[in-house]
Image: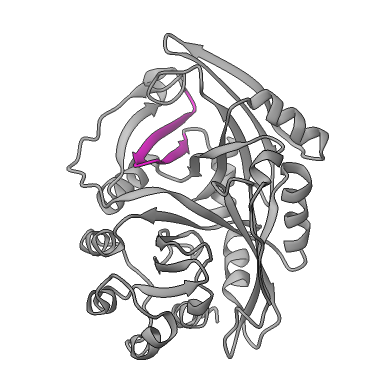
Amino acid sequence: MDTLTKNTTEVEKDLFPLLGTDYVEFYVANAKQASYYYQTAFGFECVAYRGPETGSSDAITYVLQQGKVRFLITSSLNPESEVSKHVALHGDGVKVLALWVDDAEYSFKTALERGAKEAIGLQKTSDDNGEIVTASIHTYGDTIHTFVERKNYKGVFMPGFEPKTTTVPVKSVGLQYVDHCVGNVELGGMNKWVQFYQDVMGFKLLITFDDKDISTKYTALMSKVVSNGNGYVKFPINEPAQGLKKSQIEEYLDYYKSAGVQHIAIATNNIIETVDQLRKNGVEFLQVPDTYYDTVMDRVGSIQESLVELKRLNILIDRDEEGYLLQIFTKPVQDRPTVFYEIIQRRGAKSFGKGNFKALFEAIERDQELRGTL
């Protein structure tokens, strides 16, 4: 089943309008090395830093930015800290999906009134550049959403951070903004968390995929996509479905030890240039067979890009009623097979590449087989 819900007047109905993804924060074992990887491999620039030199005695955070994408890379100096315990359990992974709002206090209060659980209470911090207001709620697993209000702040990121310049040669790969963030949850958890986003945050159900849509000979999963009214924030939620062998969702849950963020999709305006540079930088991607391209044009019709170039880079193509999209998926970017990235370019399409699911998941299964977890 594939259901697409049109969003027309929902912008006016948002409980607390979201302006976009403010940042994604990763808890990692070694922030210095992880931030170096994202700079040299993905083309992010380091723009700010917090650590012992700035008054933070137990944790270090590098703020990386490219286009409107902002990553925080955090590690702890204290083995007993929340950050260290998170890394010990999950490995390197996403802790915070921060949402940019116009009024953090109102957003937080509204979420709590509608059933959210407080993670971090309302905080107002200031420096010479103004004031930032934040507050956080729990979502699936150990992940949290932080509401960020920055309309009265003119600094590089937040109070407590100092500007920092990238010290290694960095070349942007053309990443523009976060298109969507995907969460993996346990069997039976998908509807619970879809209901959470609908009830607590006023999101709408955008698309539903069942195990007939997302399956191969061996594995299957189910997914529902929720979105806020203006479409700036979209969260697909996956859960495993019955199959002959262990699905990618089950593998993720086994290694991450709980529900969590599976992948982050980042938009580009020129996927051929972006992926070409990422490959040159050493980023590894899932590989679909060359035979995928023998019939893909029969399915998607006319496109602007060169099929020869798309095939060379192994970029996938799909079409919906409003246009087409181009997408590709990296392999996991840490030793545990958990977090990975999707690079996506939309040519009008609002969907998520349903026509590519079978080829994509067969590619994932080939990697699972090499790891011995299929």
List x then y, in percent, for residue 322: 50, 66
Coloration mode: one colour
The residue lying toward the viewer, choosing from 240 and 270, is 270
- Span of residues in magenta: 57-76
In this view, the residue farthest toward the left is 169
- Residue 75 belongs to the span the image colors magenta: yes
Out of 21 and 202, give the one closest to the viewer: 202
Residue 283 percent coordinates (x, y): 30, 62
**In this orientation, does residue 191 appear?**
yes
Compared with 207, 125 (above or below) is: above
Return the residue found at the far top: 128
Q: Is residue 360 left or right of residue 193?
A: left
* Residue 303 against residue 38 in the figure, above or below: below
Question: Magenta region's main secondary structure?
Answer: strand
- What x and y, as percent, mark residue 212? 66, 83
* In this rendering, position of residue 373 left or right of residue 265: right
Q: What residue appears at the point 40 percent right and 59 percent down from the top-left corner?
A: 333
Left-right relation of 45 to 233: left
Quadrant position of the C terminus in the picture: bottom right
- At a point 28% along the width and 63% down the height, the residue shown is 275
Tell me the quadrant of the picture where the N terminus can be found.
Answer: bottom right
The answer to which image quadrant residue 281 occupies is bottom left
**Is residue 371 visible from the viewing direction of this image?**
no
Image position of 140 with respect to 46: above or below: below
Residue at 44%, 78% in the rendered image: 367
| Total numbered badges shown on the rendered structure | 0
